[in-house]
Amino acid sequence: MRHERVTIVQLARFGDIIQTSPLIQNLKREDGVEREITLAVDHRAAPAARLLYGVDHVIEIDLSHAANLVAEGGIRAFAALKQWVSQWCPHELADRLILLNQGELTSAIATLIPAAKKIGPFLRRPLPKPHQYLNQAIRNRNMAPLHLAEVWAAYGPPILPLLPPLLKPEIPGTGVALHSMEARPDSLKTTRFVVNVGAGGQERMLPAAKLAVLVSRLLENGSTEVVLTGTRADEPVGRELLEKLEDPRLKDHVINVIGQTSISDLPGVLRSADMLISSDTGTLQLAAAIEMKTLGLFFGGANPVETGAYCNEAVALVVQGSTSGTGSDSIDPERVADLAWSIVENTWQNGRHHDSTFTLMVARPTSVGPEYVSASRIETADPAMQRRRAAARRFLWGIGEKEGASGEDRYDSPDGFRTEFSSELTR
């Protein structure tokens, strides 16, 4: 049995940390190799990293502090960064380092972490295939066929099918914020929804007025309670939502824990409910890790094919033109609530929820991993999308590869790189 120490640098947000799980699981699953995995993350996302199965050590990096150190540029800035990295990075030489973030600062930080072999989008080095794919996908979001979890997994061994995110079994994820729920002996016999009010950007958030209608409709349809979640930054939205509830009696059935739960609390909050309704957020990714029913709301540039909950049977409501930046104006919160109820009751696929303003997509299991397909054509998947997926996977995994990138492209700055890609993928 060969032993290998692997450091993964993932300095993106909470949701990206969870989507790294399939890569970590594949590194652990490979026969004949025993791997010790260290995950280096921004300190704000460290609690999410500690939840993931397969992560042996977590390095917390203050990315904001690093940005301040190099703000003026020059040799002194790099020297200051080097001294700062030496204060927290492991002294042992890792066998391999995998960088998952593209950028000058992240490349500089990863360059200073000791490892015998380094792969990823390092400055002035050949751009690896996963990031060649990502750069091409960014150019045409409507054509992007692969989930981000699958792209990250391409940096590891090709063990298929990829598994959904997985949490450590010893972390129950309970919190004080649940005490009011747990006190009710009939809690397991009722229907409860979690509504996550936040999102990664304002353009991907439902306004408080629509959230209030959504919550009201869920309760009027028979939900015993609705739990509101979000970060401290979302607290004003929660307060406005509660103020806009037309029937004041409904407030007694709303449990507001916005800003009161940590990331480690969230699994317990989610497990207490039957479904999560959320925009494109890390909470949606975390729900995938506990196999919870989810209804993702995708608008403002979000695409479930790329970042939907990575688990089988997850459902996504996609606003027409979402990948072009269309907002939430066309979302009818009452229709969302009715759809959520039908998913909980397993009646949603009877076609009653067709609407020309949005598309329903569902994640179906395949030989590679969960794939989002239109709910109206589950039996006959979109042929064009299937061709793009097949071409992208040949490019990433090297299985039946025909025309790949030259391997000589170099990434010089966030705004200055060239990408050659498979001609099949860009048809």
Image (cartoon, grey):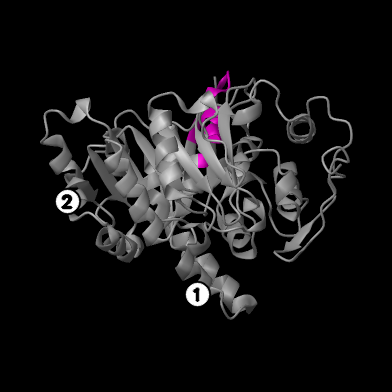
Classify 336 as above or below 125. above
Classify 177 as above or below 294. below
Classify 394 as above or below 102. above
Q: Can you give x and y, in whole percent of width and height, for residue 188 in the image? A: 21, 27
Give the number of the disc on residue 68: 1
Rendered image quadrant of residue 373: top right
Q: Is residue 291 magenta?
A: no
Residue type at numbered disc 2? Arg
**Where is the C terminus found, in terms of image quarters?**
top right
264 sits left or right of 69 in the view:
left
Mark 2 vs mark 1: which is more N-terminal? 1
Dot 2, how many residues are within 10 Å of its Cα: few (below 14), some (14-19), or many (20+)? few
Q: Which numbered mark, 2 or 1, is in the foreground of this view?
A: 2
Q: Which residues are magenta?
A: 19-36
Q: Residue at x 54, y 32 (%)?
A: 22
Q: Residue at x 27, y 32 (%)?
A: 191
Residue at image mark 2: 249
Any part of residue 94 in sight? yes
Give the number of the disc on residue 56: none
Measured in 3D between alpha carbons, the distance from the residue under mark 2 to the one under mark 1, in whole angstroms, is 49 Å
